[in-house]
Image (spheres, helix red, strand yellow):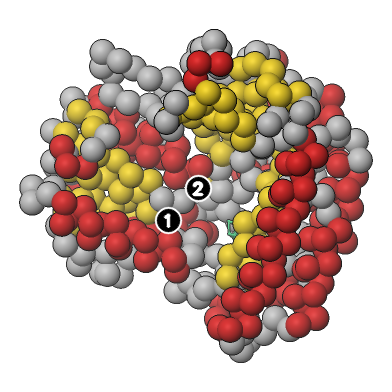
Amino acid sequence: MNVYFHTFGCKANQYDTAVVRQAFADQGATVVDDAAMADLAVVNSCTVTHESEAKLRRFVRRLARQSERLETVVMGCAAARDAGAIAALPRVRAVVGGAEPAAVLRAAGMTGVGGSGFGTRALSPGSRAPGPEPRARSRGLLKIQDGCDEHCTFCATTIARGANRSRGIPELVEEARALAEHHAEIVLTGVHIGTYGRDRTTDPRRKPGDLGALLEALITAVPSVRFRLSSIEATEVDDTVARLLIDAPRNLAAHLHAPLQSGSNRVLKRMGRHWYTAESYRARLEWLAARLPVLGLGADIIAGFPAETDDDHRATVALVAALPFTYLHVFPYSERPGAAAARLGAPVPPRVLHQRALDLRRLGEAKAQRYRAGRVGQRADGVVSGHGAGKIEVLTQDYVSVYLPTQEWDGSARFEVTVR
Ligand code: SF4
């Protein structure tokens, strides 16, 4: 059977797809890059915004138009919450909530294999069926936990992915060792990685989890690799993680993607984000930025949360302006079925909501351009992250992409690069 895979959403989803892809390959399926050659498409879905679900539906319809024999299995977060809309799309064979490989195999009509939702072997976003031309990518993913114990009122992830479940350090070290054979960078992924380890201890004083201990074990086991944190709450960057960012820049990339969501404490409270305030978020990041020669700093922000006032929006803009962000992901608020935010106040009129999103995007783009311009001509620690159209893409420790003509590349996965 020829199987085509497509992933929507975050790095945790990319990792899940890689695990499922490997399970299909282990069962004898051939993984193909082109949907037109496939008998089956497996689409890993995302539920983070209304738009991501609309994109999923468009994509599944397009697959059905593309080939008469192609059937689709939809897995992942949006699938977990499906009340029938996805199942009713053309040529959808099955809808499988979550990312359990055995369940996806069964839905595809292949003999199920055992196993947990976590992979037992090293995987990369580019992992493929064993074949004559295995292609390794320079950046691998290591999923350290799944789920989240929080209940942010705009988020349906908790419903889709369940409670925090962390993997053990020995298992992760083993997987990192295997990944290091083919990858110069390993990205630690999960849904709420700052809470890593909290579910594995009954001692409430051991907050905020053991992410620092995990990083120390990983760096000791594979010192040649550069690790990167995919997304972490600013106030969950504990002292060990901070020390590694400062003292071990070759081992832990100087990059934090720290969800902010709002710069107004009133809104943060109504979002259910009780573990930080605008002040504590700012203090932690300023402390770190002052100690690092370069820092890639990103954030997710929601514009137009229900009942957000002009003053709330101004507070967010002021906080963003004050912090050294190098990029922003701005999401106009959209209601997620099942999430509580819709019950928390009057919706912001669409015109106002989109204007606020635009203000924040413009501010983010201006900051990104300024940061990049300041980096031009400087040396950086580069890892190859992709190639195509005669160029390679090199990702610096502070999350700046540099494009080099392929002929200037000696084939190394990691090298010093001048930002241009
Ligand atoms: S911390 Fe909040 S936004 Fe993030 S996954 Fe958990 S519930 Fe969702």
Q: Amino acid at mark 2?
A: Cys
Q: Where is residue 213 shown, x and y percent of the image?
A: 73, 29
Task: Identify the image quadrant of residue 170.
Answer: top right
Location of residue 380 with respect to 178 vertically, above or below: below
User: Viewed as shown, does residue 370 lie left or right of 162?
Assistant: right
Badge 2 vs badge 1, beta-carbon distance below 8 Å = yes
Q: Which residue carries the number 2 mark?
A: 10
Location of residue 153 with respect to 222 vertically, above or below: below
For label 1, the SS is loop
Q: Amino acid at mark 1?
A: Cys
- Crowding near pointer 1: few (<14 within 10 Å), some, many (20+)? many
What label does residue 88 carry, if any? none
Q: Which residue carries the number 1 mark?
A: 46
- Which residue is more in the foreground, 375 or 60? 375
Location of residue 2 with respect to 130 vertically, above or below: below
Residue drawn 56% across the image and 16% down it: 408
Residue drawn 73% across the image and 62% down it: 363
How many marks do you count on the picture?
2
Which quadrant of the picture is home to ligand 1? bottom right
User: Viewed as shown, does residue 99 lie left or right of 329?
Assistant: left
Label located before the other in sequence (2 or 1): 2
- Assign the C terminus to one quadrant of the image: top right
Residue drawn 66% across the image and 37% down it: 399
Q: Where is residue 418 shown, x and y percent of the image?
A: 71, 24
User: Viewed as shown, does residue 137 lie left or right of 75?
Assistant: right
For label 2, the SS is loop
Instruction: Tell me: is circle 1 under 8 Å from ligand 1.
Output: no
Q: Where is residue 50 shown, x and y percent of the image?
A: 45, 69
